[in-house]
Image (spheres, grey):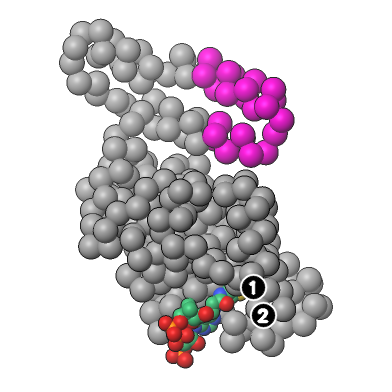
């Protein structure tokens, strides 16, 4: 499929990369971009060769937020009737394979929210995260008021959302928003290395692990633990559980069939 606002490629035969590509607007997010992003993510999710997906931007911006030049024309009736955001911005949440956000430069507003919808964030040392919507007379609308406090705690989330200040990469790592910070010129190498490690894991276990960790944010502890336990039990029916354990005991490398 030909895309105009994103670029896609496959690395190492098993990692799907989606790069947001509206450089003149610092990858500001509009409906076309979100539709194309959703289509690309779904295509990689359905491709048996792909074991991990990466969403990234440019060195200057992951995404500087929703496109303000579009939003400025909207009324309440427009956004409410058309289900703005809910309609097509949250595809990444339905992707079952692991998705890494590789963030360099600005991740602001909807850009920060998109990064937080991914499974984890690896940041370049020039990354800057923020939810500056309040300066535009709105609030975060793609999950920022919900995911940011779950990630960095209430105090820091309130600070960022109410003052609009940006967090640099080091603060984001200290706060738990990102899993690691790497030099800008190493970002894609580091992310690709992590993505290859994940893609080589037994696929069903990786998908179950993702589903189970995400359940931690959606349910009380006892329900989440029960969900985990059921998936844990179910993995004993897979060929890769047998292979992984036999290989360990035989002191050889496992050969996973992803079944
Ligand atoms: C549309 C944008 C944009 C945006 C940048 N641009 N952000 N266009 N929507 N969100 C455009 C600028 O207008 C400019 O276009 C070009 O990109 C380069 O931006 P500059 O401002 O010249 O760059 P710089 O001085 O380096 O400043 C970078 C910046 C600043 C700090 C990121 O652009 C900025 O503050 N942007 C807005 C960030 C923001 O408020 N995001 C939240 C949006 S609301 P021209 O044509 O002049 O070259 C949101 C809602 C989320 O995301 C809820 C629903 C998803």
- The percent position of residue 180, horizontal first and vertical second, equals 37, 48
Query: In the drawing, does residue 197 fall left or right of residue 169?
Result: left
Quadrant for residue 229, please give it: top right
Using the image as rendered, state which of residue 245 and residue 172 is in the foreground. Answer: 172
- The percent position of residue 20, horizontal first and vertical second, equals 41, 69
For the N terminus, give its image quadrant: bottom left
- The percent position of residue 195, horizontal first and vertical second, equals 32, 45
Q: Is mark 2 within 8 Å of ligand 1?
A: yes
Q: What residue sits 30% from the left and 54% below the top?
A: 182
Please give the residue where the numbered disc 2 appears in the rendered image: 136
As drawn, which residue projects farthest toward the left?
Answer: 252
Q: Mark 2 falls on what kind of element?
A: helix
Please give the residue where the numbered disc 1 appears in the rendered image: 133
From where the camera sits, is residue 62 visible? no
Q: Which residues are magenta?
A: 211-233
> Is residue 232 covered in magenta?
yes
Q: Mark 1 falls on what kind of element?
A: helix
Using the image as rendered, state which of residue 7 and residue 181 is in the foreground. Answer: 181
> Is residue 230 covered in magenta?
yes
Q: Does 39 appear above or below 235?
A: below
Q: Is mark 1 within 8 Å of ligand 1?
A: yes
Mark 2 nearby-residue class (10 Å; few <14, some 14–19, many ≥20): few
Quadrant for residue 202, please give it: top left
- The percent position of residue 2, horizontal first and vertical second, equals 38, 71
Mark 1 nearby-residue class (10 Å; few <14, some 14–19, many ≥20): many
């Amino acid at each position: 499929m030909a895309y105009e606002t994103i670029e896609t490629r496959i690395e190492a035969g098993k990692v799907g990369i989606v790069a947001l590509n509206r450089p003149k607007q610092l990858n500001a997010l509009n409906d076309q971009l979100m539709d194309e992003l959703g289509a690309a993510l779904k295509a990689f999710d359905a491709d048996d060769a792909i074991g991990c997906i990466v969403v990234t931007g440019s060195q200057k911006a992951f995404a500087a937020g929703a496109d303000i030049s579009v939003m400025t024309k909207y009324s309440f009736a427009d956004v409410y009737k058309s289900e703005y955001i809910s309609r097509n911005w949250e595809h990444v949440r339905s992707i079952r394979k692991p998705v890494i956000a590789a963030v360099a430069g600005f991740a602001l507003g909807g850009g920060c929210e998109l990064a937080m919808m991914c499974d984890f964030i690896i940041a370049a040392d020039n990354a800057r995260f923020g939810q500056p919507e309040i300066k535009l007379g709105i609030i975060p609308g793609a999950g920022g008021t919900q995911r940011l406090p779950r990630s960095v705690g209430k105090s820091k989330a309130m600070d960022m959302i109410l003052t609009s200040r940006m967090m640099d990469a080091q603060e984001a790592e200290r706060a738990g928003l990102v899993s690691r910070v790497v030099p800008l010129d190493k970002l894609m190498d580091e992310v690709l290395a992590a993505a290859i490690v994940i893609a080589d894991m037994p696929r069903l276990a990786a998908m179950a692990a993702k589903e189970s960790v995400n359940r931690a944010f959606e349910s009380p502890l006892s329900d989440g633990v029960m969900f985990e336990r059921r998936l844990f039990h179910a993995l004993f029916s897979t060929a890769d559980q047998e292979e992984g354990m036999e290989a360990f005991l035989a002191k050889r490398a496992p050969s996973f069939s992803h079944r």
